[in-house]
Amino acid sequence: MTLRSLLELGRLLSAASWSQGQVELAKVESEFLEAVTFASADEIVRMLETVLDEDYAGLPIWARNLAYRLACLQRPEDSALLREASADLFNHGPDWDRIAEELRKQADAAEE
């Protein structure tokens, strides 16, 4: 189990570069995966809000996608979160445009 918080790990990933060394970066990535896997939706959303506000482009796409996916799975009726995740996917598409559109439709349905 990791001793670093999800927010701390998100910040480390956001600031990480390969110049820090592949071993250290791999360790941070592994810790992030473990932390985000078992985090609550509230914790994930707080991490995303903070890290993306500090450096919108810093957090790797794979980490953003995973974090949003896990938060959305925990809150499938949270239309604001679904729309935020959808917008993030559209910003980094077009590979994920279909999924982003599905999230947008899910948000619309949640508001009905």
Image (cartoon, rainbow, N blue to C red):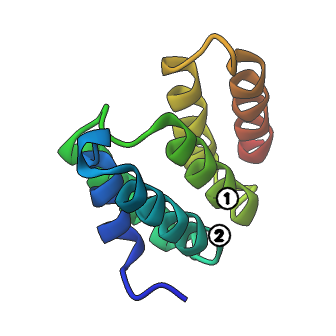
In this view, 1 is above or below 30: below
Question: Could you tell whether 78 is left or right of 53 in the image?
Answer: right
User: Which residue does the image show at 40% across and 88% down from the upper left?
Assistant: 3
User: Which residue does the image show at 59% across and 42% down from the upper left?
Assistant: 65
Q: Which residue is mark 2?
A: 37
User: Which residue does the image show at 32% across and 41% down from the upper left?
Assistant: 18
Neighbour class for label 2 at 10 Å: few (<14), some, many (≥20)?
Answer: some
Residue 27 in the image: state x and y as whole percent: 45, 66
Q: Which residue is mark 1?
A: 70
The one nearer the camera, 40 or 80, is 40
Three-letter amino acid code of the residue under disc 1: Leu
The quadrant of the rendering that contains the N terminus is: bottom right
Question: Could you tell whether 44 is left or right of 38 in the image?
Answer: left
**CB-based contact (under 8 Å), mark 1 and mark 2:** yes
* Residue 17, quarter of the rendered image: top left
The one nearer the camera, 76 or 45, is 45
* Residue 105, quarter of the rendered image: top right
In this view, 86 is above or below 16: above
